């Protein structure tokens, strides 16, 4: 088993009309977001505008959650259903849907090509993470005090970092009280 740690400072950050986007992970590695030839993309964006419309991604499903701040998503294709989201609350939606967002935030995004299945879980206690084709642990903006003793397979966890787990064995996640992380799988 291997664990790759990707802090925001080592990820690729680009500007968009409403802020910045940081791409932590893309699969396959030779893929590019602009070409839409990826299977999986995990990123985090700053939303600096009060209101914005998401880029249409018809071949993909999405999971999004605010890390800081919050926003309300509106989906015209789903009867103008609105989903208000606070930090770490998630929304699953079709990338083909016109998606309007209101509110400023830093968010966490998982995009998967249709046909793949992604899961999202907030973990707040120590446990073993079952094997899956693709496994990811994202540590949000936590303090050093909150992360004291937090580890993934003995590797100390750091804030604002994506951990990519490869291998077919369960992975031990140690979380002290007041420490909550995001766990995502893609199969």
Image (cartoon, grey):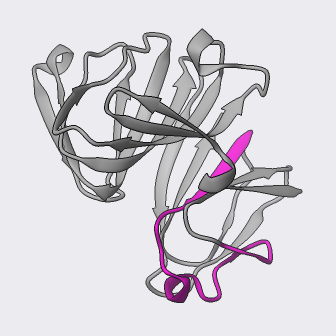
Depicted 117 relative to depicted 181: above or below: above
Tell me which corner region of the image, top left, top right, bottom left or bottom right, holds residue 64.
top left
The quadrant the C terminus occupies is top right
The quadrant the N terminus occupies is bottom right
Kindly give the residue lying farthest to the right in the view shown.
1
Q: Nearer the viewer, residue 11 or 86?
A: 11
The magenta segment = 133-157
**Residue shown at 43% from the left, 10% from the top:** 58
Depicted 104 relative to depicted 130: above or below: above
Q: Is residue 93 left or right of residue 163?
A: left
Depicted 76 relative to depicted 105: above or below: above
The location of residue 18, given as percent across then percent down, is 31, 32
The location of residue 135, given as percent across then percent down, is 68, 48
Is residue 148 rendered magenta in the image? yes
Tell me which corner region of the image, top left, top right, bottom left or bottom right, holds residue 139.
bottom right
**Residue shown at 52% from the left, 43% from the top:** 119
**Residue shown at 72% from the left, 29% from the top:** 27
Kindly give the residue lying farthest to the left in the view shown.
80
**Residue shown at 61% from the left, 10% from the top:** 35
Residue 100 appearing in the image? no
Residue 164 appearing in the image? yes
Is residue 66 rendered magenta in the image? no
């Amino acid at each position: 088993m291997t664990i790759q740690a990707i802090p925001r400072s080592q990820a690729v950050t680009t500007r968009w009309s409403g802020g910045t986007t940081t791409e932590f992970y893309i699969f396959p590695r030779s893929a590019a977001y602009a070409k839409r030839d990826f299977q999986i993309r995990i990123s985090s964006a700053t939303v600096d505008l009060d209101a914005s419309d998401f880029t249409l991604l018809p071949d993909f499903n999405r999971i999004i959650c605010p890390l800081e701040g919050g926003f309300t998503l509106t989906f015209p294709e789903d009867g103008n259903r609105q989903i208000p989201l606070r930090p770490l609350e998630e929304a699953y939606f079709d990338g083909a849907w016109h998606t309007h967002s209101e509110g400023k935030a830093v968010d966490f995004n998982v995009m998967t090509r249709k046909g793949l299945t992604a899961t999202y879980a907030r973990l707040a206690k120590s446990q073993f993470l079952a094997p899956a084709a693709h496994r990811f642990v994202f540590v949000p903006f936590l303090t050093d005090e909150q992360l004291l003793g937090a580890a993934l397979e003995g590797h100390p966890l750091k804030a604002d970092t994506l951990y990519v787990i490869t291998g077919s064995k369960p992975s031990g996640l140690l979380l002290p009280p007041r420490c909550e992380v995001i766990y995502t799988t893609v199969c």
